[in-house]
Amino acid sequence: MTGTAPRAEGPRGESQADVRPATTPPPDAQPPVRHPEAPAPGTSLGSHYDHCFGCGPQQVNGLQLEARAGEGVEVTAEFTVKPVHQGGPGLAHGGVLMSAMDEAMGSLNWILHTASVTGRLETDFVRPVPVDTVLHIHAEVTGVDGRKIYCAAEGRLGGPEGPVAIRAQALFIQVQLEHFTTHGRPQEIKAALENPDLFKRVRAFEVNP
Ligand SMILES: CCCCCCCC/C=C\CCCCCCCC(=O)SCCNC(=O)CCNC(=O)[C@H](O)C(C)(C)COP(=O)(O)OP(=O)(O)OC[C@H]1O[C@@H](n2cnc3c(N)ncnc32)[C@H](O)[C@@H]1OP(=O)(O)O
């Protein structure tokens, strides 16, 4: 009996011939460029939104990730795994670890001076990550193709040179400020727009990309 061959399609319905890992830059992607007004290497990037699960200081059960600018189009960040982040007993939840990688790669926006959101995120979990561990994350942009921003990140245990526990690749898509104002719940958008620093900072990306 001959079975039906599985459909050879990519995540967005591409044919097999077009399938390439969606988070790997195509050969004609441009190398990323550090924006001239990007924060100086070593500078803390701060939170893009106080209530963000990834970086918001007011989100007490969030990740409270603090990223710093690197020399290139890269950032470093430390994530301390707390009991509230558990999956298995005494171990970090995989989805929480993915969030930390997502947030670290999202903070590359400040280095490129653009606003972008995650379109696709792929993760390899290499080692378990116990509660109380500090995950040392390094994230970088690997290529830019129009609105598509290709990123990669690693999380290491015990120090920036420690063993790799998690690897991620992502495709971020550049968006306008209206992405947030159109889709976000009105009460949070209103409050965010009343924060003039945040609004100016993000709007500046569109005026001076
Ligand atoms: C006043 C308030 C102020 C607040 C402002 C704060 C700003 C702070 C600055 C920065 C924020 C940083 C935040 C970091 C947080 C961590 C990051 C997250 O977790 S973000 C949340 C999770 N992600 C989403 O919710 C996206 C949901 N998806 C969408 O909204 C759309 O699908 C979107 C925008 C991603 C794309 O939609 P389209 O209509 O704009 O564009 P199309 O044409 O569909 O895609 C453009 C290209 O990208 C490819 N593409 C899109 N998604 C893809 C996918 N999943 N896989 C492969 N390719 C994909 C497409 O094939 C297309 O490629 P081709 O130009 O034709 O070559």
Image (spheres, rainbow, N blue to C red):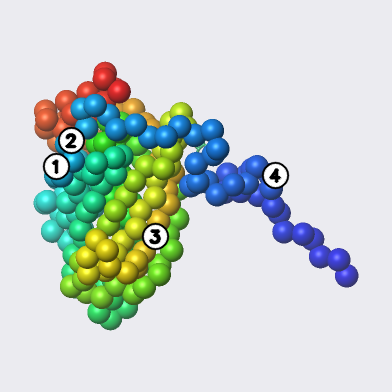
What amino acid is found at the position of numbered circle 3 in the picture? Answer: Arg
Vertical position of residue 161 compared to residue 174: above or below: below
Mark 2 to mark 1: distance in Å? 6 Å
Reading the chain from its start, which is encountered first: label 4 or label 1? 4
**Disc assigned to residue 154:** none
In the image, is the residue at mark 2 within 8 Å of ligand 1 by its beta carbon?
no
**Disc assigned to residue 167:** 3
Mark 2 to mark 4: distance in Å? 41 Å
Quickly name the residue at label 4.
Answer: 17
Classify residue 78 as left or right of residue 171: left
Badge 1 density bin: few <14, some 14–19, many ≥20, Cα 10 Å: few
User: Is residue 87 visible from the viewing direction of this image?
Assistant: no
Vertical position of residue 24 compared to residue 168: above or below: above
User: Is residue 15 visible from the viewing direction of this image?
Assistant: yes
Badge 4 density bin: few <14, some 14–19, many ≥20, Cα 10 Å: few
Quickly name the residue at label 1.
Answer: 43
Mark 3 to mark 4: distance in Å? 27 Å
Report the number of discs. 4
Badge 2 density bin: few <14, some 14–19, many ≥20, Cα 10 Å: some
Vertical position of residue 97 compared to residue 57: above or below: below
Of the pair 3 and 65, the residue shown nearer to us: 65
What amino acid is found at the position of numbered circle 2 in the picture? Answer: Pro
Reading the chain from its start, which is encountered first: label 3 or label 1? 1
Q: Specify the quadrant of the image occupied by residue 89.
A: bottom left
The local secondary structure at tag 3 comes to strand
Q: Are marks 2 and 1 in contact (CB under 8 Å)?
A: yes
Q: Specify the quadrant of the image occupied by residue 171.
A: top left
Q: Residue furthest bottom?
A: 89
